[in-house]
Structures are given as C-alpha cells and as structure tokens.
Amino acid sequence: MTDQKLIGVCHLQSEGRRIPVLLFRNGPTSVAARCLIHPGDTPILDGPSPEAVLALLAGVIDDLLLARGATTVPPI
C-alpha cells in the first residue's frame, strides 16, 4: 500500500451527510476508494476504475452507514 497514488477526491451524499471518498491508484488495473465515514472507520472498496468503485459505493452507502451505526434511524 505504500506505492498508492492519490488520483482524486469525491463526495457522496447520504442521510444528510457529505462523505469524502479518496481515490487511489493501486496499480495499472486497480483503483481503491477509501470512504471516510468517521475517524478510524474507513472502509475500502477496490475496482477496475474510479467510476466503477464510485458507482458501487453510491449503491451501498446507505446500507454501509446503517451497518456501521453511522446513521440515525428515526423512531417508529
């Protein structure tokens, strides 16, 4: 992981939050997206391109926040 190169920063919206995502080039055919949910809680997704990892993350971000207890669920 020491040879990774930061190639971009994006933000996703979820539950009223703006969540930063750092994109790193792992090698010629791999990109890692580090989702900065909370300090010390940074899930990492890998894929073939920045577009692929961002699309995957956008599709699961709400569930990921819920599973990690990083979202508030309104009372019933």
Image (cartoon, rainbow, N blue to C red):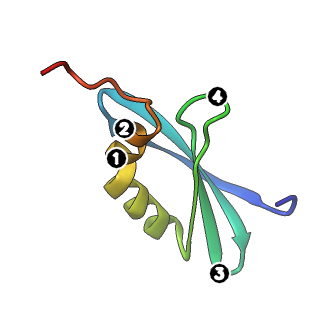
**Camera-side residue: 24 or 44?**
44
- The span from disc 3 to disc 4 (Cα, nearest Å) is 29 Å
| Residue linked to disc 4 | 39
Q: Position of residue 51 (x, y in %)?
A: 45, 66
Q: Is residue 7 left or right of residue 4?
A: left
Mark 3 vs 1, N-terminal side: 3
- Report the disc number at residue 29: 3
Q: Quadrant of the C terminus?
A: top left
| Residue linked to disc 2 | 66
Please tell me whether mark 3 or mark 1 is closer to you in this view: 1
Say whether residue 66 is visible. yes
Q: Are marks 2 and 1 in contact (CB under 8 Å)?
A: yes
Q: Position of residue 55 (x, y in %)?
A: 38, 62
Inspect the image, locate mark 2, and give the three-letter code of the amino acid beneath it.
Answer: Leu
Relative to 2, say whether 14 is above or below: above
| Residue linked to disc 1 | 63
Residue at x 33%, y 36% (from the top left corner): 14
Please tell me whether mark 4 or mark 1 is closer to you in this view: 1
Q: Looking at this view, name the residue that lies furthest to the top.
A: 75
The quarter of the picture where residue 13 lies is top left
Inspect the image, locate mark 1, and give the three-letter code of the amino acid beneath it.
Answer: Asp
Mark 3 vs 4, N-terminal side: 3
- The span from disc 4 to disc 2 (Cα, nearest Å) is 17 Å
- The span from disc 3 to disc 1 (Cα, nearest Å) is 27 Å
